[in-house]
Amino acid sequence: MRETVERIHAAALAILEGVGVSLRHPGALALLKRAGLRVEGDRVFFKPGQVQKWLALAPASFTLHARNPEHDILLGGEESHLAPGYGCPAVIAPDGRRRETVLADYLALAALVHQSGLYGLTGGILAQPNDLPAAASHLAMFLAGAWMSDRCLWAIPGEEARFRETMAAGAILFGGREAFVAKPHLLTMISTVSPLVVDRTMLDTMLVAAEHGQPLLVSPAPAAGTTGPIEPGANLALATAEALACLVLIQVAREGLPVVFGLQCYGSDLRTGQVSIGSPAYALQAAHSAALARFYHLPSRGGGAVTDAKGLTIQAGYEAMFALLAGLANRINLIVHAGGILDSFAGISYEKLMADMEMVRMVREGFCRAVTPPSREAVCELVAEVGPGGQFLTTRDTLQKCRSHSWQPWTSARGLLKDQDARGQFLASARKGMARLWDAYRPPERDQATWRGLESFAERAAGGAAGGVVALLRGAPEGSRSWLPLATGEGPAGKGGI
Amino acid sequence: MLTRQELTGIHGASLGILERAGMVFRDAVILARLADHGVRVQGQRAYFPPDVLMGWVAQAPSRFTLHAPDPARDLAFGGGSHHYAPAYGAALVAGDRGAWREATLADYLTLARLVESAPELAMNGGILVEPQDLPTAWRRPLMFFAALRLSEKALLGIPGGGEETGRILDLAELAAGGREALAARPRVLTLINTLSPLQLDASAAGSLVALCARRQPVIVTPGPMAGATGPVTLAGNLALANAECLAVIAVGQMLAPGLPMLYGVNPTTLEMRGGGVSIGAPGFAIMAQACAELARFHGLPSRGGGASTDARYPSLQSGYEGMLSLLAGRQAGLDLMLHSAGILGGYAAVSSQQLVADLEMIRAVERFLAGLRVDQESLARAVIEEVGPEGQFLTHPHTLRHCREEAWVPRLFAKGGDRAEWTEGFERSLAAERSRLLASYRLPPREAKLLTELTSYLTSLGAPAELVADIADPQGA
């Protein structure tokens, strides 16, 4: 693996030096020029020494701070943290039918994600609120995430004015600008336009985040065979080049700013030209992305419960488990899309989210748990006492340990239920699990002064488009079972209604 | 992954168990042989001194070849190859709409053809499914005959007591060309299950004795259920399974020194709410990995894992549970993964739809483990330079050159079209792939003389001549 990583690195350096990267932002180009990089038009060329120098300034790990300090997460350690699906515009029903997501979906999904206790990072584009004006949506999603959870939050990238609003809202949420900029509080995902272009919006976002001392996740996502070369090795090299270019810019803009290295190299379905996230090539590239991050001494991002399946089929199960297991086994620090994704990111599914939670628990709490070596004496004694042909079910040992040592599924069906509708069984169990989480959901502490501040900020922001968002949040029947119809695919009563 | 120290700890506990608790063998031949070899026998219970036990285990070979009807399909065990074998032992069939029904001979024959056509699967035969429409007197010999007729792959045998195993081996001898020919080259691999805790029942013991007498290899499979037939802790359950496995391997070596035996520990977990077996739980995948590690610790080839699931029908759940167990077991380096295709419902049912999906999982796992090729051509520096910012790679000659080898082309996928039909579209693709496999099946040639011999053997057991003839010559030529 080491040799492979070094070859990919060498190829990335050659691309950066020989081909360069197009950065569509005069300010960013000026910054890089001042830092001594060769700029021709909007194309920047990076010498290996320059890449090395700036890269060395990024920390190997950092703590992302949540509103509730108990939920802070360390990125770059041995642990993997998860985030749910990101960026979906549609809810997909189990049979594959879909409808547009609305703000109520955002809130319902955020409640499930928060209450499950499995996700360290939430918010972001959990579901696009198609029932709100486009200009208000970025702020509405940010506020909705903060309203529902005191865990670590995403900021949503945007052009300069929009992203400044998110940073300003973050400052209000985290106790004022001074306290906000002092520590990493909001993580923002940066994508590139492969091959080798970074657009204005993403460059705005990087520069404004740097100004506020907020960490960035750099995630180029070339699809092998379309926006990247067909060979996975070359696709990784291209993505690495794009990531390194962004990382250099970030360090030039603010030395020592925490960054996460997160290649999202996709496969392509060459029959349709669409990206493929369920293929083994994706899991393979995720494993190499993690190795590259370790090579650069940076926190890593990759994996996810991802699938190309269009509905809740067996394909959704095996593909999601494959990618999730590859991510967790490779100790990727941040695993985004670890909940709800279907159809190559085209939509999110409530039932799939419940299934993904089960998979996460299976792998993290079940499979990756160590087999505690037995005390030779204790095992011998127990087995000798039971003896050939006996049983262990009613022994004191089993009764004492059955809760902690046996696996309790949340949603997976077990046992032989001869007369039950087998197909309905999983859905019924998933919905029961959902209802249980909703019933248990308790909103985080919401400081009144802070939320009054956010409310009046929202009135002024987004050219007035986001006015009333906080009032909508206040009116939401959070954690209520009245949200159940959302999950069954029937959708909310009326557009915009919560 | 277990450390050397943890493996030693589990193994130490196993030695203690066999020394203090002993193991029951319900077979006079075995008990007499144990007593001859310095094992303390009281009634049917044998207490193994650790050095005697491990002395016999050491005689089992670390590698061997299982010979297939077609020599090109011979299988090496213990040399670093990894083989997948299909579902085994279910008596029920899950239909495409999820309903379960009793298995028939027709199901067995269809499964054997599917398995034969699937290059992912290295073995055929065994109890692909147990047909419930045949009398037990000649059911299993007929199943084995069908496998001999339909398959060129290495075959799994069928245990069922000394007499029945003898019949299976009689058939194998006819195919091999006599008793000596069969004994000289292992051709039938048979699964011997212990009855946890710490028993080998009369049926399994009789089968073992028969297999040893004709020198056919054995998979020794204890399957204690953590919390019911084994300790609730995974490590304790493994210690028990390891003890049973080593005891039976030692017995096998006493009966037939040097006989190839697979270390086939297959511990399961208990579903605490319903009391049934659970093989979709993560504990199962952990123990499958441990099986591979313990087998390496002992220097024996291993069998375990598979695409195991508790789901009742091909579903999201059967996908994620099967993939966890399959990937974990394969990465741990198991030599043979039985139950890699088609099994459902905690071994209770088999499904041809699930089998086709499991084949896709196997392909994905193998593609993943094949890793990346990184060299000048694959790194494509010049190509990236040529395409440059904002370009695209789809129509570049480099993409056309490598798209067949590098792009993952799933066999199963939902075609576009009506959105409401997407899920059904995937099911149609499962069905289409199944039809493709069945259509690609080719009946291997068999000598008429052999078919006559096999037929008369089966009819002597009471199998109707017409039924046997249908299998012997399915095209009615």
Image (tube, coloured by chain):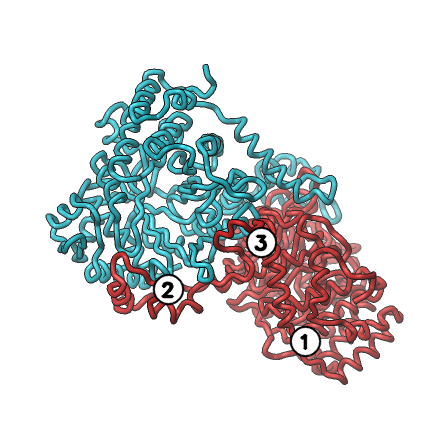
Q: Determine whether the residue tagged by mark 1 lies in a helix, strand or loop.
A: loop
Question: Given the image, what chain letter belongs to the residue carrying mark 1?
Answer: A
From where the camera sits, is residue A475 visible?
Answer: yes
Type of amino acid at the residue the image marks with label 1: Pro
Image quarter (top left, top right, bottom left or bottom right) of the C terminus of chain A: bottom right
Between residue A327 and residue A55, name the one nearer to us. Answer: A327
Distance from Cα at disc 2 to Cα at disc 3? 29 Å
Q: Colour of chain A?
A: red
Q: Tell me if residue B94 comes above or below residue B72 in the rendering.
A: below
Q: Are marks 1 and 2 in contact (CB under 8 Å)?
A: no
Type of amino acid at the residue the image marks with label 3: Gln
Q: Colour of chain B?
A: cyan
Distance from Cα at disc 1 to Cα at disc 2? 37 Å
Q: Are marks 2 and 3 in contact (CB under 8 Å)?
A: no
Task: Give residue A443's mark.
Answer: 1
Residue highlighted by disc 3: A425
Please give the name of the residue rendered at 54% of the width and 42% of the height, measured from the top-left corner.
B357
Q: Quadrant of residue B64?
A: top left
Q: Tell me if residue A411 comes above or below residue B222 in the rendering.
A: below
Q: Position of residue A380 (x, y in %)?
A: 26, 65
The residue lying furthest to the right in this view is A463
Question: Given the image, what chain letter belongs to the residue carrying mark 3?
Answer: A
